Amino acid sequence: MPHGSSVRNRWSTAGRVLLFLLICPLLLILAGPFCSRLPGQLSQVVLGSTTTVATVILTGLFLRWDRLHFRDVGAAPDRQSAIRMLGGFALGLLLVAFQTCFVMLAGHVHWVRTSSVGLVSVGTALLAYVALASREELAFRGYPLRRLHSCFGLWTAQIVVALAFAMEHVAGGSTWTNAMLGAFVGSLLFGMAALAMRGLAVPIGLHAAWNFGQWTIGEKENSGLWRPVVEQGYKQHVDHMGMLGYLLVFGSATVAFYLFDNFRTRREQRQATGD
């Protein structure tokens, strides 16, 4: 009987997580038309901010349903959150630098300064990517990841959340190939960072820095500080090297967080037993 009750609890948790993952994109869809009327990156700042607030409220409702608290899903800020977020941001910029160096070494591409992009555009883009990253980390690596992790273990939780993250990107216009190689792999890193660091501050910083860094070097829809100039006939080659570099740096960072999480967990277990 206790075993049957445990199974029912696990699957009821899975059902609530699925409901949460269905509601989150609906909030994005509802907010999108209103925010799109604003000019440029300002629309993304408002969209990210409003949907972040909505996702915080939604998380609170589901936590109340589960009789849990924000700290139980890593979403409760503390005095160290700002420092951890800045650390995650620095790491994210480092990953952008590593990937860019990898592409540069492959050759046939260089970057030129975009004269039309100034300080205001940089500040707006930074705010936009921080707001959007906050929303995505709350929506995927907060309540869903932590609840699935507690019931089904690390890799089941990671794969389910990464698939949901990829599907949202497909709904937003990405191809399945780009979503699986891009968003899915990215979710594994952000999820591992959230679990290893026991909260969302590091993955928010990491996620925001990656997107901001990609914007800076002209890899987003909007013009960044620089734009890539590819030699004629080498675009496919450069794209392939960019994806390979992405997989290498994100894969390495994911493994590093996984190893750190194992080390930290073993240390906490030894402290708990007094060894």
Image (spheres, rainbow, N blue to C red):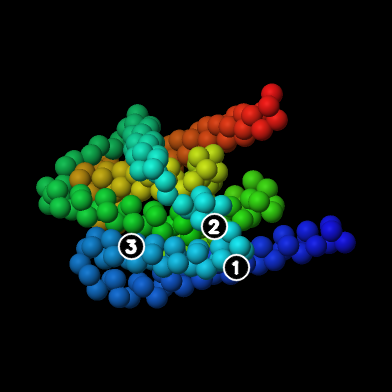
Look at the numbered disc 1 and give the secondary structure of its residue: helix
CB-based contact (under 8 Å), mark 3 and mark 2 = no
Could you tell me how far apart the alpha carbons at marks 1 and 3 are, in whole angstroms? 25 Å
Residue at image position (28%, 61%) is 45
Q: Earlier in the sequence, mark 3 or mark 2?
A: 3
Which class describes the residues within 10 Å of circle 2: few (<14), some (14-19), or many (20+)? some
User: What kind of element bears circle 2?
Assistant: loop
Q: Circle 1 sits on which residue?
A: 65
Three-letter code, disc 1: Trp
When the figure is inspected, residue 225 is found, relative to residue 51, above or below; the finding is above
User: Which residue does the numbered mark 3 point to in the structure image?
Assistant: 49
x%, y% of residue 132?
Answer: 36, 57
- Tag 1 near tag 3, CB within 8 Å: no
Of circles 1 and 3, which is in front?
Answer: 1
Q: Is residue 157 left or right of residue 59?
A: right
Q: What is the x, y in percent for residue 144?
A: 57, 58
| Quadrant assignment, res 34 | bottom left
Residue 4 visible in the shown view: yes
Classify 10 Å Cα crowding around label 3: few (below 14), some (14-19), many (20 and above).
Answer: many
User: Closest to the observer: 76 or 28?
Assistant: 76
* Residue 238 visible within the image: no
Q: Quadrant of residue 172?
A: bottom left
Horizontal side of residue 31 vs 113, given as left or right: right
Residue 230's mark? none
Residue at x 58% of width, y 59% of height: 68
- Residue at the spot 22% in from the left edge and 55% down from the top edge: 124
Q: Which residue is mark 2?
A: 69
Quarter that holds the N terminus: bottom right
Decide if residue 127 is on the left or right side of residue 25. left
